Amino acid sequence: MKNGAPWVGDQVRDEATGRTAIITDVQSGRYVLRALHGVCQWTALEAARLTVTEPLPDPYAPTPAPQR
Protein backbone atom coordinates (compact mmCIF):
# COMPACT_ATOMS: atom_id res chain seq x y z
CA MET A 1 0.00 0.00 0.00
CA LYS A 2 1.11 3.53 -0.67
CA ASN A 3 -0.40 6.38 1.33
CA GLY A 4 -3.26 4.06 2.35
CA ALA A 5 -4.19 3.14 -1.23
CA PRO A 6 -3.61 -0.14 -3.08
CA TRP A 7 -0.30 -0.15 -4.96
CA VAL A 8 1.90 -2.24 -7.24
CA GLY A 9 2.60 -5.66 -5.75
CA ASP A 10 -0.46 -5.72 -3.49
CA GLN A 11 -2.87 -8.63 -3.78
CA VAL A 12 -6.40 -7.25 -4.10
CA ARG A 13 -9.99 -8.32 -4.59
CA ASP A 14 -11.63 -6.43 -7.46
CA GLU A 15 -15.22 -5.98 -6.28
CA ALA A 16 -16.31 -4.97 -9.80
CA THR A 17 -15.38 -8.39 -11.22
CA GLY A 18 -15.32 -10.55 -8.09
CA ARG A 19 -11.76 -11.71 -8.89
CA THR A 20 -8.54 -11.68 -6.88
CA ALA A 21 -5.44 -10.25 -8.53
CA ILE A 22 -2.03 -8.65 -8.15
CA ILE A 23 -1.60 -4.98 -9.08
CA THR A 24 1.12 -4.90 -11.75
CA ASP A 25 0.99 -1.22 -12.72
CA VAL A 26 -0.79 2.07 -12.03
CA GLN A 27 -1.26 4.37 -15.03
CA SER A 28 -3.05 7.71 -14.64
CA GLY A 29 -5.15 6.39 -11.76
CA ARG A 30 -6.03 3.14 -13.53
CA TYR A 31 -4.92 -0.10 -11.91
CA VAL A 32 -3.57 -2.86 -14.14
CA LEU A 33 -4.41 -6.21 -12.54
CA ARG A 34 -3.15 -9.74 -13.25
CA ALA A 35 -5.02 -12.84 -12.15
CA LEU A 36 -3.33 -14.90 -9.43
CA HIS A 37 -3.45 -17.97 -11.67
CA GLY A 38 -3.17 -17.75 -15.42
CA VAL A 39 -2.34 -14.86 -17.69
CA CYS A 40 -5.60 -12.90 -17.60
CA GLN A 41 -5.03 -9.15 -17.23
CA TRP A 42 -7.54 -6.29 -16.89
CA THR A 43 -7.81 -2.66 -15.80
CA ALA A 44 -9.69 -1.44 -12.73
CA LEU A 45 -10.80 2.17 -12.98
CA GLU A 46 -11.68 2.76 -9.32
CA ALA A 47 -9.34 2.22 -6.37
CA ALA A 48 -12.41 2.32 -4.12
CA ARG A 49 -13.57 -1.01 -5.63
CA LEU A 50 -10.24 -2.71 -4.78
CA THR A 51 -9.77 -4.33 -1.37
CA VAL A 52 -6.22 -5.22 -0.34
CA THR A 53 -6.19 -8.87 0.76
CA GLU A 54 -2.42 -9.13 1.17
CA PRO A 55 -0.13 -6.09 0.99
CA LEU A 56 3.33 -6.31 -0.50
CA PRO A 57 5.73 -6.72 2.44
CA ASP A 58 7.75 -3.62 3.32
CA PRO A 59 11.39 -4.46 2.50
CA TYR A 60 12.57 -1.88 5.07
CA ALA A 61 10.45 -3.14 7.99
CA PRO A 62 12.55 -4.46 10.86
CA THR A 63 12.58 -8.23 11.17
CA PRO A 64 12.07 -9.73 14.61
CA ALA A 65 15.05 -11.39 16.26
CA PRO A 66 14.97 -15.19 16.13
CA GLN A 67 13.68 -16.89 19.26
CA ARG A 68 16.18 -19.04 21.16
Image: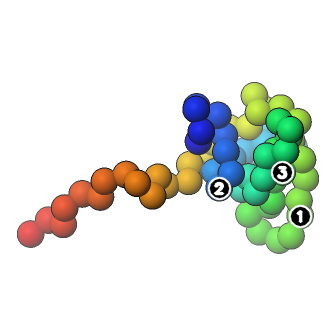
The quarter holding residue 68 reads bottom left
Q: Which circle's residue, 3 or 2, is located before the other in the chain?
A: 2
Going 66% across and 40% down the picture, which residue do you hit?
A: 6
Residue that appears at 88% across and 59% down: 41
Give the side of residue 47 with respect to residue 1, left or right. Answer: right
Quarter of the figure that contains the N terminus: top right
Q: Give the labeled residue for mark 3.
A: 32
- The relative height of residue 66 versus residue 50 in the rendered view (above or below) is below
Q: Which of label 1 and label 3 is nearer to you?
A: 3
Q: Residue 10 location, x and y as percent?
A: 63, 51
Q: Residue furthest left?
A: 68
Quote the CA–CA distance across marks 1 and 3: 11 Å
Type of residue at label 1?
Cys
Q: Which residue is tagged 1? A: 40
In x, y percent, where is residue 46? 83, 32
The image position of residue 38, as x and y in percent, is: 83, 71
Residue 11 visible in rendering: no
| SS for dot 1 | loop
Q: Secondary structure at mark 3?
A: strand
Tag 2: residue type? Gly
Residue in the picture at 67% in, 45% down? 7
Q: Nearer the viewer, residue 18 or 58?
A: 58
Relative to 62, 1 lies left or right: right
Looking at the image, which residue sits at the far top?
48
> Which residue in the structure is indicated by mark 2?
9
- Position of 59 with respect to 33 (left or right) is left
Q: Are marks 3 and 2 in contact (CB under 8 Å)?
A: no
